Image (cartoon, helix red, strand yellow):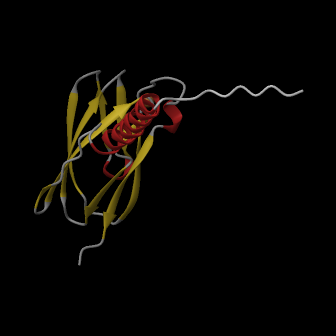
């Protein structure tokens, strides 16, 4: 013998389920979109001066790459949003440390073409070794 239990849902229940589902989907997309676009500001610049707002956090730089053209004057505002971090751009021999909630300004002229790694030089925890990003200088014209 088989017992079947059937639950009948009213139109109101179905409508509410649908609305809740739509809210969840929209919220998921919203958070993802915000995370991709507005979580950390990245700004451009004018003509040959390129300005970047780079965020250092455990354990990454955001954005992960900075793209400029050969000969550009590069200005990086480096901000830490958690613990003290550092930066070392070997190609231009630039070092700096940045304290939590502080911003350091780094300036250099992108006079070499290529991919240049920079990394954290202030021990910031277990992921410190992986905290690296790139300055990518493209040939002009
Ligand atoms: Cu570090």
Image location (x, y in percent) of residue 119: 42, 40
Tell me the residue at 30%/36% (across/down): 55
Q: Quadrant of ligand 1?
A: top left
Given residues 84 and 33, the one toward you in this image is 33
The quarter of the displayed image where residue 102 is located? top left
Residue 102 vertical position relative to residue 47 in the rendered view, above or below: above
Quadrant placement of the N terminus = top right
Image location (x, y in percent) of residue 114: 38, 64
Quadrant placement of the C terminus = bottom left
Given residues 2 and 92, the one toward you in this image is 2
Tell me the residue at 52%/35% (across/down): 129
Which residue, as the protein is rendered here, is positioned at the far right? Answer: 1
Image location (x, y in percent) of residue 135: 34, 54
Which residue, as the protein is rendered here, is positioned at the far left? Answer: 46
Image location (x, y in percent) of residue 66: 31, 53
Q: How many marks?
A: 0
Residue 59 vertical position relative to residue 72 in the rendered view, above or below: above
13 relative position to 45: left or right: right
Which residue, as the protein is rendered here, is positioned at the far front? Answer: 1
Residue 59 vertical position relative to residue 92 in the rendered view, above or below: above
Tell me the residue at 41%/27% (across/down): 122
Residue 76 vertical position relative to residue 96 in the rendered view, above or below: below
The quarter of the displayed image where residue 110 is located? bottom left
């Amino acid at each position: 013998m088989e017992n079947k239990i059937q639950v009948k849902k009213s139109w109101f229940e179905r409508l509410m389920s649908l609305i809740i589902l739509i809210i969840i989907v929209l919220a998921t997309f919203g958070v993802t979109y915000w995370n991709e676009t507005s979580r950390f500001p990245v700004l451009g610049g004018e003509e040959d001066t390129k300005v970047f707002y780079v965020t250092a956090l455990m354990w990454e730089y955001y954005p992960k790459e900075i793209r400029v053209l050969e000969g550009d004057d590069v200005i990086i505002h480096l901000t830490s949003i958690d613990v003290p971090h550092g930066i070392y751009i070997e190609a231009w021999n630039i070092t700096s440390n940045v304290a939590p909630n502080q911003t350091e300004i780094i300036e250099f002229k992108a006079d070499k073409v290529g991919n240049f790694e920079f990394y954290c030089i202030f021990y910031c925890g277990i992921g410190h070794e992986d905290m690296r990003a790139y300055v990518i200088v493209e040939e002009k014209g």
